[in-house]
Image: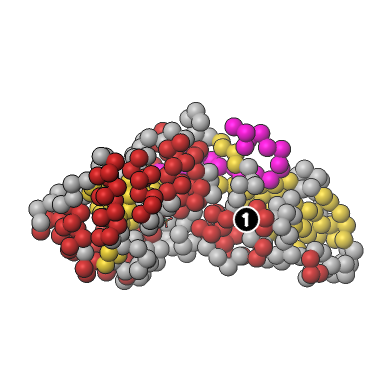
Amino acid sequence: MSETMSQRPTRIVVDLDALGHNLQAIRSHVGVPVMAIVKANAYGHGLVPVAHYLQAQGVKQFGVAVVEEALTLRRAGITVPVLVLGGILGRQVTQLIQHDLEITVSSLDKLRKVEAAAERLGRKAVIHLKIDTGMERIGVHSYSCGPFIEAAAASTWCVVKGVYSHLACADDPASAMTLAQLERFQTACAHFDRIGAPMPIRHLANSGGVLHFPQTWLDMVRPGIMLYGVLPDPDAHRSVELRPALSLVSQVVYFKVVKAGNPVSYGATWAPAEDTHVITVPIGYGDGYPRALSNRGEVLIRGERRPIVGRLCMDQFMVDLGPHGSAYVEDDVVLIGQQGELSLTVEDVAAWADTIGYEVLTRFNERIPREYIGGQVAR
Ligand SMILES: *Cc1c(COP(=O)(O)O)cnc(C)c1O
């Protein structure tokens, strides 16, 4: 794989065995099939390699956000069902059906569009009905979904494989919102029984649901972030033992002494009180490493935690080793992951940057090469 041939010292290392461990942990926790959510480049872990690995682990359903992600999976030889979770436009429907992709139908109007396209192609469309139980994003409101469900169940050209909704507050075990959403969802699903239509696969739980709300597991669960070993909310207790799959590492590219009082980097926001040793690390916000870590973040080098000093630049940033700290060019620098006894997590980076783990992971872009370890699978 050309990506792994990169000479760049900065890289993301994905531990496929950790991914496999998390999948297995989720499966034995919930006891129902898992729709593996691999949107946004598999939360930054690399869509195609992750999907190949998970398919080999027996995952029978993928979920992505946009049509292009689904097409990438098909082109890469992923054969299991792929559901596009996001809202779709009429012009995208034909392509979805032609590539045997499952469609989220989130209104009566979209149902009609999918039916028309399927009839034109002479090929049935596999759909999942989206019910809005309180997220107010996409979907037919649960309190008015009767006619929608009837129309879908009666459709000649659409096969209703699933019915689902999305939880707004499941990362908070104390929120009453989740059980209220569940109840609305159950009421919506009851329409199938009422009209004597077969019950499709009911799915509701994201990672928060998997972790905190067993009632939401139903027929299938849709974990995303926890599959990668990151918690939706770092304060939540861990009902499932997870292993972070992603490490972000780089190497020292420069070492120097900065004299007392001489400021470091753009804006001259930091200067040492005494002469100190400073290294430069070749990664920056142009890679998706947050600029908000300026004067806030830490890295691991030579088995110690050291602070990022001065503004983080587009392609590089500086770290203070202290007056007696030593390091050599090419020494490993860990930005996320373990070094010796110490570790830095996605959750740590998110806290320093005042954001959530989801955003930290999905901002890492294609300039950072991905490397895969573990996983006894040919890729
Ligand atoms: C992203 C997404 C998920 C996964 O959410 P996590 O919080 O990462 O587990 C599940 N369902 C839908 C509809 C999503 O958009």
- Residue lying at 25% horizontally and 39% vertically, measured from the top left: 122
Q: Name the residue at 76% across, 44% down.
A: 331
Q: In this view, does 354 lie to the left or right of 264?
A: left
**In the image, residue 111 lies at what x, y percent?**
26, 55
Between 352 and 206, the residue placed more toward the observer is 206
Q: Tell me: 22 left or right of 345.
A: left
Taking the magenta stretch, the answer to whether it contains residue 16 is yes
Circle 1: element type: loop
Q: What residue type is labelled 1?
A: Gly
Q: 303 or 206, which is in the foreground?
A: 206
Give ligand 1's quarter of the image.
bottom left
Please identify the quarter of the rendering in which residue 137 is found: bottom left
Q: Give the range drawn in magenta.
A: 1-23
Q: Is residue 236 above or below residue 247?
A: below
Residue under label 1: 288
Q: Identify the residue at horizontal 34%, vertical 60% (top origin).
A: 166
